[in-house]
Image: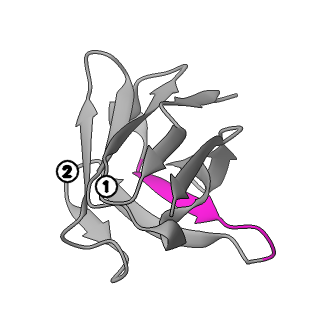
């Protein structure tokens, strides 16, 4: 069983920055893909960014150029650096790891961008 713990969320002003962390109970190098998703109130959960085991990243159009995903294999942690935040980025952000055919979710961390 994989456990993922997100942290780093909070309240930030428009144009501000936050860095989210997702720490895994096992080696993140063993995961096929690790991804960030978000869910705003009343909306479907949506893809934000992902990173393959080889380090290739992919971003949703809405965050490309503003968000950057990175990782520390030593710390078993992936990060999501979020810059130039907008009110529409307000959501609960979730980390998901894919191990084989199974996917594991974290509990989420709230990001609120104040207008």
Q: Give the residue at x 37% y 77%.
A: 60
Q: Position of residue 99 (x, y in %)?
A: 54, 45
Q: Position of residue 27 (x, y in %)?
A: 41, 24
The residue carrying mark 1 is 51
The chief SS type of the magenta part is: strand
The relative height of residue 114 versus residue 99 in the rendered view (above or below) is: below
Q: Quarter holding the N terminus?
A: top right
Check disc 2: other Cα within 10 Å, few if <14, some if 14-19, many if 20+: some
The residue carrying mark 2 is 55
Callout 2: helix, strand or loop? loop
Which of the pair 83/69 is nearer the observer?
83
Per the rendered image, the range of residues in magenta is: 32-42
Q: Is residue 99 visible?
A: no
Task: Give the distance between the C-alpha atoms of the residues marked 1 and 2, in whole angstroms.
Answer: 6 Å
Q: Is residue 89 visible?
A: yes
Q: Position of residue 8 (x, y in %)?
A: 47, 31
Q: Seen from this angle, which residue lies furthest bottom? A: 61
Snapshot quadrant of residue 21? top left
In the rendered structure, the answer to whether residue 54 lies left or right of residue 86 reads: left
The relative height of residue 63 versus residue 13 in the rendered view (above or below) is: below
The relative height of residue 83 versus residue 18 in the rendered view (above or below) is: below
Was residue 13 drawn as part of the magenta stretch in this picture?
no
């Amino acid at each position: 069983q994989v456990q993922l713990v997100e942290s780093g969320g909070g309240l930030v002003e428009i144009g501000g920055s936050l860095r989210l962390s997702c720490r895994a109970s096992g080696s993140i190098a063993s995961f096929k893909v690790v991804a960030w998703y978000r869910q705003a109130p009343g909306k479907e959960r949506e893809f934000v960014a992902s990173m393959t085991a080889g380090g290739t990243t992919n971003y949703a159009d809405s965050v490309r150029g503003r968000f950057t995903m990175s990782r520390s294999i030593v710390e078993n942690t992936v990060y999501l650096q979020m810059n130039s935040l907008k009110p529409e980025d307000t959501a609960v952000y979730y980390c998901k790891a894919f191990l084989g055919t199974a996917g594991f979710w974290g509990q989420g961390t709230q990001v609120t961008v104040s207008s």
